Amino acid sequence: MNKVIERKMIVPNLHLLTLEAPEVARKIRPGQFVIVRPHDEGERIPLTAADWDAEKGTVSCVFMEVGASTGRLALLKAGDSVPTCVGPLGNATEIANYGTVLCVGGCYGIGSIYPVCRELKRAGNRVLTVLEARSSYLLYWLKEIAQASSQLFNVTRDGSLGAKGHAGKIIDIVKEQRKLPDRVIVNGCTFLMARVSEATRSLGIPTFVNLNPIMIDGTGMCGVCRVTVAGRTRFACVDGPEFNGHDIDWKEFLARRKAYMEEEVLLTRRSAPAEPVHREGKCHS
Amino acid sequence: MNHEESPKEERGKKLDLNRNEMPKQPPVVRRRNFSEVALGYTADLALTEAKRCMQCKKPKCVTGCPVDIDIPGFISHVVKGDFAGGIKKIKETNCLPAVSGRVCPQEMQCESQCVLKNKKGEIAIGRIERFLADWEAANGIAEVPPRAKPSGKKVAVVGSGPAGITVAGDLILLGHEVTVFEALHKAGGVLTYGIPEFRLPKSVVAREVDYVKRLGVEVVTDFVVGKTRTVDELLETYDAIFVGTGAGLPWFMNIPGENLNGVYSANEYLTRMNLMHGYLFPGAATPVKKHTRVAVVGGGNVAMDSARTALRMGAEEVYIVYRRSHAELPARLEESENAEEEGVIFKVLTLPVAYEGDDRGWVRQMECLRMELGEPDASGRRAPIEVKGSNFRISVDAVVCAIGNSPNPLIPSTTSGLEVTKRGTLVADLETGKTTRDRIWAGGDIVTGAATVILAMGAGRKAAKSIHAFLS
């Protein structure tokens, strides 16, 4: 059992969930994830850590409300508890002094890229961070991330904050640098990670992405999270979740992520919450 | 039938009887439900079967038992109608009788040694064992044996499968404090995530786990040793550690198309159904797909479990695709027979070489080769040899790969000083379970590679003895 310290919608459809998990908080590092079960017959949901406090014994994650299970998470209130929060799972982002690192965060990945920026800066890197969203009202933690970075860029589809554009604009930012970054790290939706990886390949910049496939146990037992990396089958839960973005078979990865879309719809209908949880009434991703 | 008759007279008479069959759900009914297939002996059947036992002076059956159960001993209690005495006798050496009575391959162990084997049929030892365990459960709470004086010593057990539960049950009675750490959200290991409800009801597993909890064992779920805390960190608080993390890393064949949607490892398929209650979907939240034609690759018990689960999930056709012939199937005869009765189609001497999918990335057919048998290989079974040019296709919408598992590398890779074999198993003394590092023991599949529940329990028992000697 893990107590819910806080659960709030930080921007439409994206929630911050802070759980009491002292053992996990003591150990977790940037890029690692926990598995949370919202209730006793609930699914095991992998969530990448966005923050933690070893002293208070808490772990925070940002998640997007997409289906029935995340819908249940979105109904949690402070003082509730969840039956499972296990971790830290997966390998941590490799933190070293690479020189200049460009970090990209989109969607819930804005949350999970935050500790990556913070630790990279602490390790002496020049950290350039690009946050991407459809519109300014979907961006969050701007102040915290600006502090954890050497320079912050915003890219919005409607141009309401920062540069106007999408993944392509991010590539422009990379190319505009006087000296190309030594490394690129992307956290966010599959589309964003795949597009940025494709673009940095020709520039020869090592690019790492934090994959978010379907998982069950998260400890290497079931193999549902398998992904083809450089022609080899790897398990994202134990071999990843971070991989070289240039080596990933993105088409296969995307197909595997969508495997249960039809079943998700069935569940969403059956478990539609009694009270509305979508403040804006539609999905903004 | 009269239970009052003297056992001696009865025995002479009953020797002419063949082994008593255990009632089962009829195949046409059970192939579509998840209730237990074998219904267990009634008291009458157990008694009749027990009376056939010759009570050998030098019982060979016991030599076939990995945990040395006093088999004639517990059977003699049954003959007297003393079921409580019978189960007590079993529990002296086996703390999971309801489990072993169901899933032990008795036909290769105790029952294979029975002197009646070549006469009227060996005693159905497993069925009597199962009867006693279920009788105990049905008749109130199992008696909790007295605990030795507290030793002040603490033991951590990693993994709550059959090996870990056995070690915990033994050491707690010897006076030590025991904590079991389980990575998943429910205890029981393979008994919980792997073996399906219709073969081993989860209520039976829960009962056995509850029993060790009532003995005083602390069970911590959602705790991944190696991640949440390392073995080295545990050694700061615990005097000894037992590693029983099993063989949980699924093998794939590394053939084209294996990562298509609809291709599962048996671990995934069974975990979805058992641990996550996928068979209740959408009553439980973990989604499962509805499949029509399912091929299960492999010929062991896990393959049979997967195939029979697929039938119960409503598949129209389910195949076992196995590269050797019927005679070499590693599954228990009882399980392959059950599968066949239920309508699983056996495609033996068949080797998958590739999977082909549709434009959405879902598996649609598998390409196979026909095989023939050659000379015996290292395993003693006749080796399968490919028939060149015999390629053919089977249309499927799901494939379950049940070709085996290797140990999960999590503990060896996060603990220094633990020697590992080429197969990824931990090096440990088979008599004591001692690993290559002080204060660490190991047993079960993590040492032997994928094997049986009872062998894991046997290993647990030996390790518990050795740990106790070390702590005393």
Image (cartoon, coloured by chain):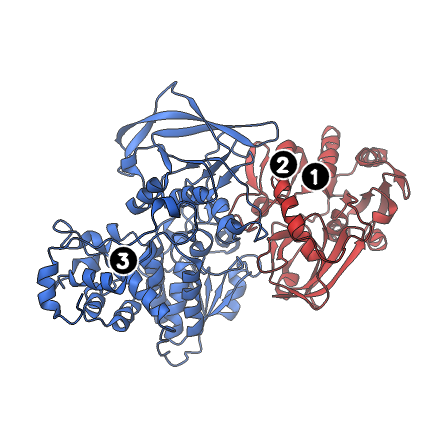
Chain colours: A red, B blue
| Crowd tier of the residue under label 1, counting other residues whose Cα lies within 10 Å: few below 14, some 14–19, many 20 or above | some
Q: Earlier in the sequence, mark 2 or mark 1?
A: 1
Q: Is residue A82 above or below residue A119?
A: below
**Residue appearing at x 58%, y 43% in the figure:** A225
Of the residues shown, which amino acid type is indicated by label 3? Answer: Gly
Residue A20's tag is none
| Circle 2 chain | A
Q: Which mark is residue B126?
A: 3
Residues at marks 2 and 1 touching, judged by CB atoms closer than 8 Å: yes
Q: Is residue A166 left or right of residue A253?
A: right
Where's the N terminus of chain A, which quadrant? Answer: bottom right
Report helix, strand or loop for mark 1.
Answer: helix
Relative to A180, say whether B56 is above or below: below
Chain under numbered label 3: B
Q: Looking at the picture, how far across and down is residue B386, in whole percent?
A: 35, 24
Q: Pointer 2: what residue? A: A253
Which chain does the numbered disc 1 sit on?
A: A
Residue at 65 percent of width and 65 percent of height:
A81
Q: Amino acid at mark 1?
A: Thr
Q: Which residue is mark 1?
A: A190
